[in-house]
Image (cartoon, rainbow, N blue to C red):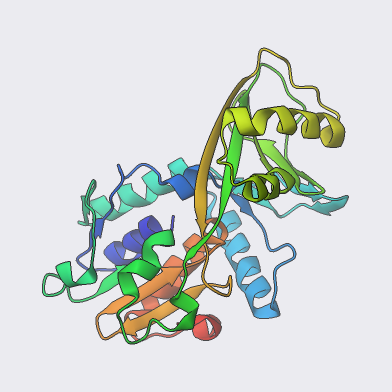
Amino acid sequence: MLGASVAAALATTGDAVTLLTDGDGKTTPASAASFAWVNARDKSPESYRRLNEDARRRHDESQAGWFVGSGAIADGTELPEDGYVDTSAFIATHLDAARAAGAVIRTGTTVGSLDELRGAFDVVVVAGGTATAGLVRDLPGAARRLSKTEGADGFLARIAVDEHPVHRIVSVDGLQARPDGDGTVAVQSLAIERSLRERRAAASVDTVWPALRDEIATKLAWRVPASARVTVARAARPHAADGLPVVGWVSDDAYVVLSHSGVTLAPLLAELVARDLRGDEDPRLAAWRP
């Protein structure tokens, strides 16, 4: 999400951009396993909440097909401005825009060290998610906040079913559900994620579905039909050492963009980063420097 949007923002404003990814360019494990809820709920400190609010408005203003302004209800509180992102559509749209502006997209390319890129590029923007700490650990600006960039594992279950009662984002005591295209519901359970960590078990249909089916019945009053088809995506979540965004220079030629709230923040951060790299610093970035 962050890499694709930053690449598009830089390319469309005139920079020569090469995007390197070790994946297929369609998604990443973290994006595929994200609940992708665009929100500013329960986020602190206040500067972080405001940044997320600004980003949520940017999604809504975009009127783009990858954002669904469904609204949400979270533990009884109505959140009409919230919505969710089709992460695959978001990535595809931004990579298409980057290519149209002349960017080169190199998929299946693993970068083991930033030294491999020095001399070939004027600036390297590291939007490497959980791999960020390993890439920047030897750089002078990679201080404590980038000592760790891999958070706990999370999962997203997708339930394909003919009919379902979920028509917007619903969050009840850590169980979160939303539509995910026609005939599919995406579900996340924070309680089951905690249980998996305690048991040191990986998320899969076998380890997740029995408990998740019961939790859905209890909290959403929906008994999922036995004919439903269930898949589970899992990934470690990108997460700085203090859990907050990291945006800025870590050396003369390397710049980091990292955030746990990557889905919410991506469009706004892409714009601010493109300006920042040209010396036009937005005050909203001041709190998130490495």
Closest to the observer: 264 or 43? Answer: 43
Say whether residue 128 is visible: no
Q: Is residue 108 left or right of residue 143?
A: left
Considering only vertical position in the picture, is 274 above or below 157?
Answer: below
Say whether residue 219 is visible: yes
Q: Residue furthest left?
A: 119
Rendered residue at 58%/48% (across/down): 154
Percent x, y of residue 89: 45, 41
Q: Residue furthest top?
A: 227
Percent x, y of residue 134: 35, 67
Considering only vertical position in the picture, is 140 above or below 263?
Answer: below
Q: Is residue 47 left or right of residue 250?
A: right
Percent x, y of residue 54: 61, 69
State the quadrant of the C terminus: bottom left
Q: Residue furthest front?
A: 199
Percent x, y of residue 67: 56, 47
Q: Is residue 45 left or right of residue 241?
A: right
Rendered residue at 16%/67% (across/down): 116
Closest to the observer: 208 or 5? Answer: 208
Rendered residue at 60%/27% (across/down): 206
